[in-house]
């Protein structure tokens, strides 16, 4: 069975035949690819590495046979981008080791556990076994040995079958580095182990992923609290700005009212809560806006708040110059606060997107664990 047929590539054959090596690497790689597919049993990562090396060889020959190289490259890349017809996950994945099985009659490939499940169901239903892709009839006696064993295990012992060789797919899990490491470790450690050990490993994965998902949920709750605080603080700034705009006279009496208004709004308390909430998430004002001295800005807001309270709670000092200084502070500080809030909101949005992805990917892993366990 030749999954890669070179009879239609004369220019490319001349190119590689003319190489000084006794047996050019390209022909060896094609033979290995065809032999693995013909044998009908192989690991996805081994196959992917062979195809990748063949792609590199063909790419290097493009100058001598560009059209033929383009056709062959497309065929090679199809081999590693096709999906398993049963689960619709990528059939070949260089990142993880997944057993692949090829049906000898029609040469269609599947994940071993997927086609085994399919054939076991048809056997239990006393139906004629056929290929899920083309519906060609299947001679069970002619199937690869590993596939025969998997189908038999599912029919005679349904609780043991899926646990015998099932791997956890990384399809759809691309952003959560911690999850990817957990899955890869499980796939590596469970290969070739018995059902008891594999069950224990699955329990460990489920516990770790559940803990990961809970951590993401808690982070999401904290982010929501920060978002509510920034919305509250933004509203306070807007109210204060509107109040000042409605009273342009800037009298001492009005400044006294502004001081009372600011204190009643507790703007500084909210800014402090935002700062503390960010710290709990491992964030800081300095990380959000490295070009702005936010420590000083935060200190300015605190100082202004304290000066207003001192001015109107303590001894009176009613000169016009002092009043003008307070008005200048009042016009500058809200702009600084709003700059901080804009940066905080953007960071909360990005972190929130990450939390949603993490929870979705954790759910994908837990779903697969449940399927492998058979419950």
Image (spheres, grey):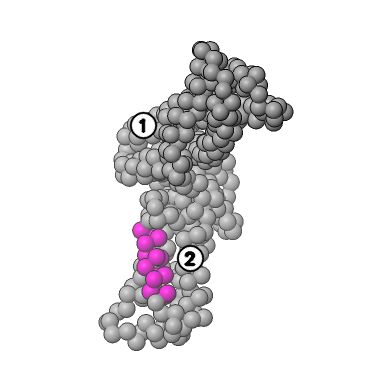
Q: Could you say which quadrant of the image residue 100 lies in?
A: bottom left
Q: Using the numbered discs, state the Cα–Cα distance from disc 2 to disc 1 in whole angstroms.
A: 36 Å
Task: Name the residue beneath numbered marker 2.
Answer: 77
Residue 140, image x and y in percent? Answer: 47, 52
Residue 313, image x and y in percent? Answer: 53, 12
- Is 280 positioned to the left or the right of 327 in the image? left
The magenta stretch spans residue 161: no
- Is 145 positioned to the left or the right of 103 in the image? left
Residue 304, image x and y in percent? Answer: 51, 26
Of the pair 5 and 256, the residue shown nearer to us:
256
Mark 2: few/some/many CA within 10 Å (<14, 14-19, 20+): some
> Can residue 213 be seen in the rendering of this structure?
no
Mark 1: few/some/many CA within 10 Å (<14, 14-19, 20+): some
Identified at 52% across, 59% down, the residue is: 82
Q: Is the magenta stretch mostly helix, strand or loop?
A: helix
The magenta region covers 46-59
Q: Is mark 1 on a helix, strand or loop?
A: helix
Q: What element carries label 2?
A: helix
Identified at 58% across, 46% down, the residue is: 127
86 shown above or below 4: above
13 shown above or below 121: below
The magenta stretch spans residue 56: yes
Of the pair 103 and 74, the residue shown nearer to us:
74
Residue 326: numbered disc: none
Q: Could you say which quadrant of the image residue 25 lies in?
A: bottom left
Disc on the earlier residue, 2 or 1? 2
- Is 239 positioned to the left or the right of 52 in the image? right
Identified at 37% across, 42% down, the residue is: 181
Task: Name the residue beneath numbered marker 1.
Answer: 204
214 shown above or below 57: above
């Amino acid at each position: 069975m030749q999954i890669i047929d070179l009879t239609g590539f004369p220019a490319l054959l001349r190119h590689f035949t003319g190489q000084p090596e006794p047996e050019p690497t390209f022909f060896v790689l094609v033979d290995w690819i065809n032999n693995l597919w013909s044998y009908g049993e192989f690991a996805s990562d081994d196959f992917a590495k062979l195809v990748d090396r063949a792609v590199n060889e063909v790419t290097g020959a493009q100058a001598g046979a560009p059209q033929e190289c383009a056709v062959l490259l497309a065929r090679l890349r199809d081999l590693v981008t096709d999906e398993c017809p049963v689960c619709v996950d990528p059939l070949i994945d260089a990142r993880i080791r997944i057993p692949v099985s090829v049906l000898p009659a029609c040469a269609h490939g599947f994940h071993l556990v997927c086609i085994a499940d399919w054939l076991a169901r048809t056997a239990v239903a006393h139906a004629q076994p056929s290929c899920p892709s083309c519906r060609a009839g299947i001679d069970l006696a002619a199937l690869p040995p590993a596939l025969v064993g998997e189908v038999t295990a599912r029919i005679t012992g349904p609780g043991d079958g899926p646990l015998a060789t099932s791997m956890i797919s990384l399809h759809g899990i691309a952003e959560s580095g911690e999850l990817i490491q957990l899955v890869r470790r499980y796939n590596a450690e469970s290969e070739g182990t018995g059902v008891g050990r594999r069950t224990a490993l699955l329990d460990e994965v489920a516990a770790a992923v559940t803990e990961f998902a809970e951590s993401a949920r808690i982070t999401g709750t904290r982010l929501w609290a920060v978002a509510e605080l920034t919305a509250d603080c933004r509203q306070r700034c807007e109210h204060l700005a509107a109040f000042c705009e409605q009273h342009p006279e800037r009298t001492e009496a009005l400044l006294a009212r502004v001081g009372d208004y600011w204190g009643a709004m507790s703007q500084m308390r909210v800014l402090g809560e935002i700062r503390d909430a960010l710290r709990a998430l491992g964030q800081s004002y300095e990380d959000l806006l490295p070009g702005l001295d936010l420590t000083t800005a935060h200190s300015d807001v605190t100082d202004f708040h304290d000066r207003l309270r001192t001015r109107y709670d303590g001894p009176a000092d009613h000169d016009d110059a002092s009043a003008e200084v307070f008005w200048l502070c009042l016009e500058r500080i809200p702009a600084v606060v709003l700059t901080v809030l804009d940066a905080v909101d953007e960071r909360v949005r990005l972190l929130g997107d990450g939390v949603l992805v993490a929870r979705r990917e954790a759910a994908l892993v837990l779903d697969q664990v449940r399927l492998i366990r058979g419950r």
